[in-house]
Image (cartoon, rainbow, N blue to C red):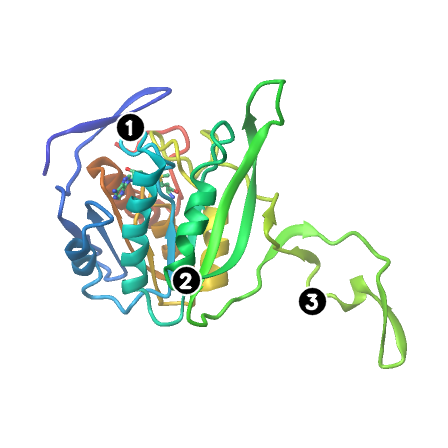
Amino acid sequence: MTKRASIADDAGAVEITPRLRPGEVWRDPEGRHAVACGDCTDRSLVLNLLRDFPAPTLAVHDPPYNLVMFERRTIGEYIRWCRSWIDLTGEILADNASLYVWLGADQRCHFQPLPQFMSMMADTGFESRSFITMRNQRGYGTQKNWMAVRQELLSYTKGNPAFEVQYTDIPKILRGYYKNVGGRRTENMERSRSETIRAGNVWVDIQQVFYRMEENVEGCKAQKPLKATERIILASSARDQTVVDFFSHAGTTLLACERTGRRCVTLDIDPVYAELTIRRLEHFRETGRTGWQRERPA
Ligand SMILES: C[S@@+](CC[C@H](N)C(=O)[O-])C[C@H]1O[C@@H](n2cnc3c(N)ncnc32)[C@H](O)[C@@H]1O
């Protein structure tokens, strides 16, 4: 055990005693997942983390948006740092695999690091696949600009991975697109495979995590919604395949893997977030609940 640590949030500090020290790996007693505490560019740690797993077919990364350990790096340094974990991802992924990266865009500074990151990816061996935008419900900004409500999600492939179309919960309501099928005039609602709209590259149907939601993990400000993470996992991996996430934080990818029958290997540089990741899984297995809402994980 390492010494107690705390993470601050609106309600005060969450006291927690991390079980992992930097460089250590927790292996799931049920043999499904593994969590490490350490740096995403530490190749030997990542290889050790993956020791008992088939090569991942999906990576879902959500790096800090150029605010690494609360100090802003120059854009050049930030992109060089991204390149090192992208190259490591390319090395560990299966021959046919998908990569998703959540990335911010600073509208006060030429939208960095989004364009630089996109350019950097051009010679990594990954192919660009989709540029997804997720709409947040709560935006920020003044009355003098458009409210900022978007989160960017870049999708890439290595080789030729499978892709499973996903559907939203938004009912189809528009008629009027007619086509002749077998000599009979049919309209779009009649021909469709689903009552709901297929997920495209703009996601407006996902609730941003906030403290009243069951999945909320107190102290985790950058938590992504389970619904978005599960959508990625269901589209781009199959049951029992391995999913990797280098920036675990609230353990969203790990929990989404547990709920969808995938295996997850994940890490976080901060022992407190590595601990919260493990506790979130344990809590889910004990209670069926996805987070703590307003209670404390400690
Ligand atoms: C934006 S959050 C990830 C949120 C996550 N997707 C979720 O839903 O909870 C980024 C995380 O990356 C971790 N981190 C920052 N630098 C890191 C590094 N070099 N290696 C591994 N993790 C790092 C931070 O401690 C933080 O918990």
What amino acid is found at the position of numbered circle 2 in the picture? Phe
User: How many other residues sit within 10 Å of disc 2, few (<14), some (14-19) or many (≥20)?
Assistant: some
Tell me the residue at 13%/47% (across/down).
Answer: 23
> Which residue occupies the foreground of this view, 209 or 282?
209
Whether residue 198 appears in this view of the structure is yes
Residue type at mark 3: give it: Arg
- Which residue is the site of mark 1? 71
Instruction: From the image, tell me which residue sits under label 3.
Output: 193
Relative to 119, say whether 55 is above or below.
Answer: below
**Camera-nearest residue between 74 and 189:** 74
Q: Are marks 1 and 3 in contact (CB under 8 Å)?
A: no
Quarter of the picture holding the C terminus:
top left
User: Are discs 3 and 2 less than 8 Å apart at CB?
Assistant: no
- Amino acid type shown at disc 1: Glu
Q: Earlier in the sequence, mark 3 or mark 2?
A: 2
Residue displayed at 35% across by 42% down:
63
Sort mark 1 into few (<14), some (14-19) or many (20+) by Cα contacts within 10 Å.
Answer: few
Disc 3 residue: CB within 8 Å of ligand 1: no
Mark 1 Cβ and ligand 1 under 8 Å apart: no
Q: Quadrant of ligand 1?
A: top left
Q: Which residue is mark 2?
A: 126
Q: CA distance from mark 1 to mark 2?
A: 29 Å
Name the residue rendered at 42%, 39% in the picture: 113
Indicate left or right for 154 with 92 as reference: right
Residue 32's x, y, as percent?
28, 61
- Residue depth check, mark 1 versus mark 3: number of the one nearer the observer: 1
Assign a secondary structure to mark 3. Answer: loop
- Which of these two is toward me, 176 or 287? 176
Q: Identify the element where label 2 is drawn.
A: loop
